[in-house]
Image (cartoon, rainbow, N blue to C red):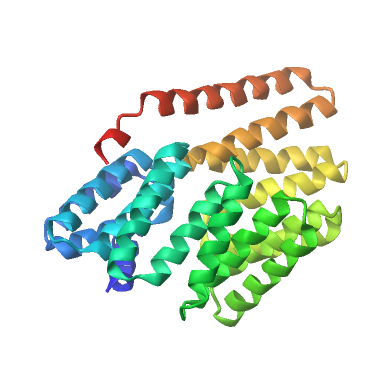
């Protein structure tokens, strides 16, 4: 049922995916025609790009879905909504509320007996905590993988393998990271998962980048880029432009690096991918410094700090968390 709802959302609103006003205007009109469970499933199926770029409005819809799910006492749907909220808060930079939402998702999934939901949410929490508490992130990730191994959901297990590979990469265990990346890649390739394949390719590329094998890293990045270009995956394209830029920077092809960083930043700003905006501004400042363009370097240093300050302000004054 949820897959059919998801397809319906994409068909109805795919052409308006970058217009907040138009998307939610049509979306709200469509919701009025649905019963409670259909409304919940339709809200859960809001496309990732809308959630990522229009986080505030999407969270408002998630809160509506949560209210409806609680009214009908559907623990599985409650878990799904909390998991989506956790992801939305994470991408908006509100990490504390993200963890709180994910924890509530796990509690709901435990009540409904949804093992895939439990495992995937633990794995998601682990991945999201990688920059803040790596030991705890590892604990959650392994916990999620052990649960997912007891299920038949290979795609969810593949995602967890890829994500734990990233954690090992953060811990400078590149061979262990590659081991998990290849495990994940074999699963998505066998299932012809068009979303999972470029994700796995990028992770393998990242590991080779860390091992300073830049040509091999670039090869994997470009393969992922071509797939995401065909799908017009803006979130993915923004990431890949950044990855490719970093290879060129390490190869001392600074002009090509800047070109790719700027492309990544433009898309990141369009879809409001805050963390990647920060990363790109930092990389651009470093790149411009390297070629002696200190005026542009200062511009992007200041822009990086402004984004960082904005995130802190939003976390300090966010009123959303109090009503979860």
Say whether residue 16 is visible: no
How many numbered marks are there? 0
Q: Position of residue 164 (x, y in %)?
A: 62, 60
Say whether residue 109 is left or right of residue 301: left
| 153 over 305 or under it: above or below | below
| 280 over 228 or under it: above or below | above
| 60 over 69 or under it: above or below | above
Say whether residue 281 is left or right of residue 57: right
Q: Quadrant of residue 252?
A: top right
Residue name at image x 29 percent, y 49 percent: 23
Q: Position of residue 195 (x, y in %)?
A: 53, 66
Q: Position of residue 152 (x, y in %)?
A: 46, 81
The quadrant of the picture occupied by the N terminus is: bottom left
Say whether residue 262 is left or right of residue 270: right
| 265 over 174 or under it: above or below | above
Say whether residue 208 is visible: yes
Q: Nearer the viewer, residue 30 or 317?
A: 317
The quadrant of the picture occupied by the C terminus is: top left
Q: Quadrant of residue 301?
A: top right
Residue name at image x 52 percent, y 37 percent: 274
Q: Position of residue 121 (x, y in %)?
A: 44, 59
Residue name at image x 77 percent, y 51 percent: 172
């Amino acid at each position: 049922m949820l897959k059919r709802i998801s397809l319906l959302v994409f068909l109805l609103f795919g052409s308006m995916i970058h217009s907040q006003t138009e998307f939610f205007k049509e979306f709200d009109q469509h919701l009025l025609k649905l019963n409670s469970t259909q409304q919940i499933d339709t809200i859960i199926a809001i496309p990732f790009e809308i959630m990522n770029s229009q986080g505030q409005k999407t969270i408002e819809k998630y809160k509506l879905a949560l209210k409806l799910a609680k009214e009908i006492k559907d623990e599985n749907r409650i878990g799904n909504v909390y998991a989506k909220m956790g992801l939305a808060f994470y991408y908006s930079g509100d990490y504390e509320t993200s963890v709180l939402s994910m924890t509530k998702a796990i509690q709901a999934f435990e009540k409904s007996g949804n093992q895939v939901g439990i495992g995937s949410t633990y794995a998601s929490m682990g991945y999201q905590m990688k920059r803040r508490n790596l030991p705890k992130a590892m604990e959650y990730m392994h916990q999620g993988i052990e649960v997912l191994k007891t299920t038949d959901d290979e795609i969810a297990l593949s995602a967890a393998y890829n994500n734990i590979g990233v954690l090992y990469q953060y811990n400078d265990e590149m061979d262990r990271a590659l081991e998990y990346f290849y495990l994940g890649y074999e699963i998505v390739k066998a299932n012809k998962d068009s979303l999972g394949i470029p994700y796995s390719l990028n992770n393998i590329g990242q590991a080779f980048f860390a091992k300073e094998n830049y040509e091999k890293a670039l090869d994997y990045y470009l393969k992922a880029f071509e797939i995401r270009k065909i799908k017009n995956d803006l979130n993915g394209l923004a990431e890949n432009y950044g990855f490719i830029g970093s290879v060129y920077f390490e190869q001392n092809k600074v002009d090509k690096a800047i070109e790719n960083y700027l492309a990544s930043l433009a898309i990141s700003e369009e879809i409001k991918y805050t963390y990647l905006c920060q990363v790109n501004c930092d990389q651009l400042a470093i790149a411009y410094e390297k070629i002696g363009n200190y005026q542009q370097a200062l511009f992007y240093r200041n822009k990086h700090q402004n984004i960082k300050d904005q995130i802190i302000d939003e976390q300090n004054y966010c009123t959303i968390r109090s009503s979860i």
